[in-house]
């Protein structure tokens, strides 16, 4: 008949192996999550930049024509209405 201490040691060993496996799985899941966070941040930065060769003025108007406002991304603030404002300055959600 196995001893109580032997049974406890065996259960402790099994529990330790399970914890180690879960820690490895958690590290892998965190790495995947971190890559998604970095990708989302990078896309947000790229979308926030004005198109190459075109500088957006604070009002979103360049010269005679209206330009896309660099901040026109989902979740962005709606600009104040003014005569001649192009609907393209609104985020796609609007």
Image: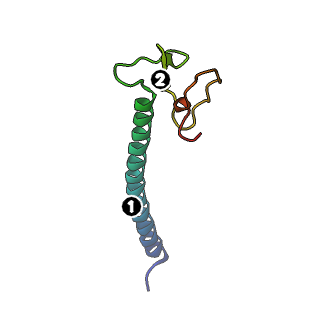
Seen from this angle, which residue lies furthest top? 63
Depth order, front residue of 63/50: 63
Q: Count every numbered label the image shows and give the total.
A: 2
Give left or right: position of 69 versus 94. Answer: left
Residue drawn at point x = 34 percent, y = 23 percent: 52
As drawn, 46 above or below 22 = above
Which residue appears at 44% of the width and 60% of the height? 19
Residue position for label 2? 67
Between 19 and 37, the one lying in front of the other is 37
Whole-percent x and y of residue 77? 61, 29
Closer to viewer: mark 2 or mark 1: 2
Does residue 32 lie above or below 63 as drawn?
A: below
- Badge 2 element: loop
Q: Residue 21, position in %: x, y?
A: 38, 61
State the scheme by which the image is colored: rainbow
Q: Quadrant of the N terminus?
A: bottom left
Quarter-wise, where is residue 93 in the image?
top right
Tell me: residue 38, above or below residue 20: above
Mark 1 residue element: helix
* Residue 55, x across and y down, in percent: 42, 17
Question: Can you identify the residue that label 1 sits on?
Answer: 21
In the rendered image, the vertical position of residue 61 relative to residue 25, given as above or below: above
Quadrant hosting residue 85: top right
> Of label 2 and label 1, which has the lower sequence position?
1
Count neighbours of disc 2 (C-alpha within 10 A) and say few if under 14, some if 14 to 19, many if 20 or more.
Answer: many
């Amino acid at each position: 008949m196995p001893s109580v201490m032997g049974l406890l040691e065996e259960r402790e060993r099994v529990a330790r192996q399970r914890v180690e496996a879960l820690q490895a799985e958690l590290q892998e899941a965190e790495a995947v999550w971190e890559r998604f966070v970095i990708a989302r941040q990078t896309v947000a930065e790229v979308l926030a930049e004005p198109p190459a060769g075109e500088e957006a003025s604070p009002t979103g108007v360049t010269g005679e024509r209206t330009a896309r406002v660099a901040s026109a991304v989902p979740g962005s603030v709606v600009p104040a209405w003014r005569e001649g404002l192009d609907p393209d300055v609104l985020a796609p959600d609007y």
